[in-house]
Structure formats: structure tokens, C-alpha cells
Image (cartoon, grey):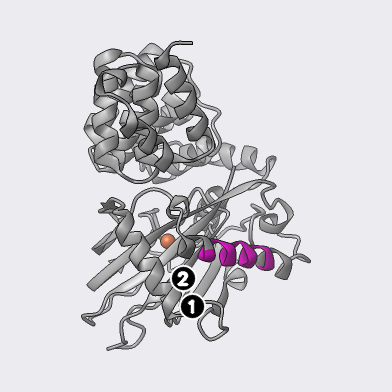
Amino acid sequence: MTLKTKNIEILKKLFDQNKYQEVIQEVDKLKKEDIDHIDTLNLIAYAYARIGKLENSIDFFYRALEVNSENYTTLIGLGDTLQEIGKQIEALNFYEKAVEKYPDDDVANFSLAQGYRKIENLKKAAFYYGKTDRRLSTAFQLECIYLDKNSDKKEFDKIIDESRKEAPNPLVASISRHAAIKNSTYDNYNFCSEPFKFINKENLIQNNIIDDDLINDLMRDINDANTSQKAQALIINGLQTSGNLFLLNSSSVNKIKEIIEKKIKLYREEFSDSREGIIKYWPKNFDIYGWIITLKKGGELKPHIHKLGWISSSIYLKRPKRKGLNDGDLKFSFDGAEYPSNGVSFPEKIQEINKGDMIMFPSSIFHSTIPFSSDEERITLAFDVLPT
Ligand SMILES: [Fe+2]
């Protein structure tokens, strides 16, 4: 086995064990001339992307492109990372190349669909979602059709009917409920018929589960990790960390993760008698994917759902003092994402938020932050239970 092949084996093994920091540490030990194999470059680029260091990731993907401009892994990875930093047109260019070279590939078609969706070309996005069997592609196709004023209503109904035959998913549930309220019809998609009843709130500080020391350690560890912060179209006056927070291997992050794992179990148990799809089809395997959202004065998070999640949650690590009624609180709703509402009013629920609160809710509910005017920051740890 040559040295280069051996290096790739080592890096691949670490990568497959999700040890991304260690991949990077191993690479630091290599001589520059040994980092010229396409697999090595892709592994490093992906490792950087996974821990949220996107600029480094992009540098290595470009180096990989110089070695092979048609490599599938490079084209998709570079597209994904460019998309993450908001360079949508450049990302699209690499996805196009991938579909051109691998026209039947699920991931390439799905990524291209996502790319078109980002630039609001709904027709093309729906077309490419329709060409892939990837999980959630039907839900995303349905969403594009729902949003597209010129789309065929029959196509929409057909997809909803087909989806009912399969295990439910929160995005189809959200769209189906929205369309039912808008059209004053009955929603018979079985995910969670009364989602407001599935909102769970607990104060982790009052219940002695977390304290200020843990919050401060966590904030310090996240700052020390120097994770990229990304602007996000839904966030006004604020930032969101990139990558999965729970991949940071620090004791504070691990402590929080342990607490969250227990709470997810308890949430499921609390509703164990329910016949709703959210409980009945609870994912056998899932990951917990977390991130931090920091909002500053005037900060706001527009209504959205967590499309990839099953249940979602937010834990309030810092909460600005209220200056007006409900400022900085959380609003749940059945409307958002610029779905066509035709002037119909949708049910809402305002959830009061205090520091230390942990709110868990079905990923199918729209939620938003009510803007606040205090000078203090509002820091939230958000996470999704992601079916895998
Ligand atoms: Fe959210």
C-alpha cells in the first residue's frame, strides 16, 4: 500500500466515525505534496464543512476540482457548501455539471432541485424533485407546486393522495393543513391533527437541570470553536451557527446533548397513548442536529418550519428583558413561508419565553420570534430530531 493510499484509508476511517476534527489534525501532519489525491482533498473539504468551517472547505473543494473537474463528490460537495454561504448561482453551476454527467443520480437531481428552489425557479425545482426518489423529495415537490401560482391543482391533490399511503412527514402535514384551512376543507393527513397540544414547555433552570455555569461554558466552547456564522434569509439582525453543534466535542456540549436525549425520550413517552402519526411512526433512527441563533436588538426570526425534522426544540440561553407585551416571545402558527393564504386568517398561539425554557414541538408547526427592542442579546440553542 502506498503512503498516499494509506493516508486516505486513515482519513476515511476517521471521517466515517464522524471524527472531523481529527481528520483535520491528521491532514496538518501531512506534507503539502501528499495532499493532491482527489479522495484526500474531498475528505478534508467535507470534514471542514461538517464542522462549519466553510471557507476552508471551499478552498479544498477547488483544489479537488483542479485534480478532476468532473468528480461527483467534489461537484456535489462544492455546490452544497457554496449554497450554505449564499452563493446560489455558483452552486447551481456545479449541480448542473453533476446532473449533466450523472443524469439519473438521485442526489445530483435533488441538489439541482434545491438549487433552483433557492433562486425561486419553482417550476424547474419541482421538475428535478420529481426525478429523484430521495427522502422528502415528494414533500419538496409538493411545496413548490403549492407555491407556484401557475401550477396544476390536480397535480397537488394527486401528490397529497399518494403521500397518505406512506408514513407521514411534517412538511406534507404542514402544507396539507395550510391548504385545508385556506380552502375550508377537512385535513385528513395523519401527522399531528392538533399540533398546539403537542407543544411542551419546561424551564430547565428552575428544575435544576442546567445553570448559568453550564450556559457560560457552552457559550465559551462555541466561541472557542470558531464555528462559521451564517446569515439566514429568515433572520433579521442575527446570525446562526453552521454545521451540527453536537459535533463539537466539549464537555458542555456533551452535557447538553445528554439532557436533550433524555427530554426527547420523555416527550415521546408523554404522548405514548396518542394515535397521531407523529407518535405512531416515530423514527426508529434519528440524529440530533443543533445550532445556535443569536438575535440582537430589533432581531426577529420569520415564520418557518423545520422541514427536515420530526420534532424541533429551542432552549433559551439568554433572553432580553421585555420592554413591550410579548417582545422576544415565540409565536406558533399554521401560516408562513409565503404559502398562498388568500386573505384567510390562520390560528396562532403565543408562547411566553423565559431564560432556561425548553420548548419542544412537532416540526410541522410554523413558528417565529416576536421582535424585541432591548439592547441585550437573545441566544437560543435550537435542535431538530432528524429521522435518518
Ligand atoms: Fe425554528
Earlier residue among tags 2 and 1: 2
Camera sees residue 150? no
Q: Residue at x 53, y 65 (%)?
A: 255
x and y percentages locating residue 189 in the rendered image: 64, 52
Q: Is residue 37 above or below residue 42?
A: above
Q: In this figure, which residue is indicated by the disc labeled 2?
A: 315
Q: Are marks 2 and 1 in contact (CB under 8 Å)?
A: yes
- Dot label at residue 357: 1
Magenta segment: does it hold 176? Answer: no
Q: Residue at x 35, y 67 (%)?
A: 219
Q: Is residue 113 above or below residue 374?
A: above
Residue range corresponding to the magenta coloring:
255-266
Residue closer to the observer: 40 or 65 = 40
Disc 1: residue Cβ within 8 A of ligand 1's nearest atom: no
Question: Residue flagged by tag 2: what amino acid is it?
Answer: Ile
- Considering the whole magenta stretch, tell me its main secondary structure: helix
Q: Residues within 10 Å of mark 1 (few under 14, many from 20)?
A: many
Residues under labels 2 and 1: Cα distance?
A: 6 Å
x and y percentages locating residue 330 in the rendered image: 41, 74
x and y percentages locating residue 71 in the rendered image: 36, 16
Question: Residue flagged by tag 1: what amino acid is it?
Answer: Asp
Q: Residue at x 51, y 40 (%)?
A: 156
